[in-house]
Amino acid sequence: MDQQVLSSLIVKYPLGTLFSAGVSGLMVTPIPFLLTPDDDGKPKLIGHLARANPHWKDLVGLSECLVVFQGSDNYITPSWYPTKQLTHKVVPTWNYEIVEVKGIPTVIESTDWLRDQVEKITDSMESKRKQPWKITDAPPEYIAAMLKAIVGLQIEITSIAGKWKMSQNQSDENVQGVIDGLSQGDDPHSNFKVADAIRARFTEKKKGGV
């Protein structure tokens, strides 16, 4: 799958679920990550955890971890398929977008690094607002205290893969039926975001894309 497509999902849905298996066993923590290039231009993930969260201690010296980014998803009812009326050979399913990143974690406690990371991820999210909030808007002593309460995390990406299930296994008429069904605001399973995602993938397929 196109790396730009994978990167775009991470940027759009930055809250990743971090999984690791260290001395304490399997541990899981949701963390907002920023995808950014390292000094060699290779992509890496940076984020932070609360110092009170024991997960960070388990990451020290660990050779691998997994971060899962979940995009849009929704239940798909067979009732949306036009072919249901003809054969009834249809079943319910679930559409989803997901990116799995494996990498080598590094725990960072440098205050300067943490401040830079917090500024970068804050700016990336606040840039969408008319009046962006900046870290300098808060009192310096307050920010200093907050930085002491977190620990930085950098993940050197070793592999990245995506799984998209957006009705691409269905006929064109069934795909259109799903888009129409998801776009009905009064339907209990409507979801305009997933409808747009399917429509985008459907259009790419028509053009001969991924």
Image (spheres, rainbow, N blue to C red):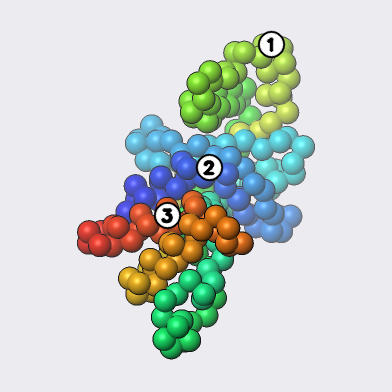
Question: In terms of secondary structure, where does tag 2 sit?
Answer: loop
> How far separated are the C-alphas under marks 3 and 1?
41 Å
Q: Position of residue 8 (x, y in %)?
A: 41, 45
11 vs 108, nearest the viewer? 11
Label 3 or label 1, whichever lies nearer to me, is 3
Amino acid type at circle 2 is Pro
Residue 206 higher or lower than 146, as above or below: below
> How far separated are the C-alphas under marks 3 and 2?
17 Å
* Mark 1 vs 2, N-terminal side: 2
The residue that disc 2 covers is: 14
- State which quadrant residue 160 falls in: bottom left
Residue 51 higher or lower than 178, as above or below: above
The quadrant of the picture occupied by the C terminus is: bottom left
Tell me if 45 is positioned left or right of 28 in this view.
left
- Residue at horizontal 58%, vertical 40%? 32
Classed neighbour count for the residue bearing mark 3: other residues with Cα under 10 Å, few (<14), some (14–19), many (≥20): some
Residue 126 higher or lower than 135, as above or below: below
Residue 173 higher or lower than 101, as above or below: below
- State which quadrant residue 66 falls in: bottom right
Mark seen at residue 197: 3
Tell me if 87 is positioned left or right of 132 in this view.
left
The residue that disc 1 covers is: 139
Can you see residue 147? yes
> How far separated are the C-alphas under marks 1 and 2?
27 Å
Amino acid type at circle 3 is Ala
Classed neighbour count for the residue bearing mark 1: other residues with Cα under 10 Å, few (<14), some (14–19), many (≥20): few
Label 3 or label 2, whichever lies nearer to me, is 3
* Mark 3 vs 1, N-terminal side: 1
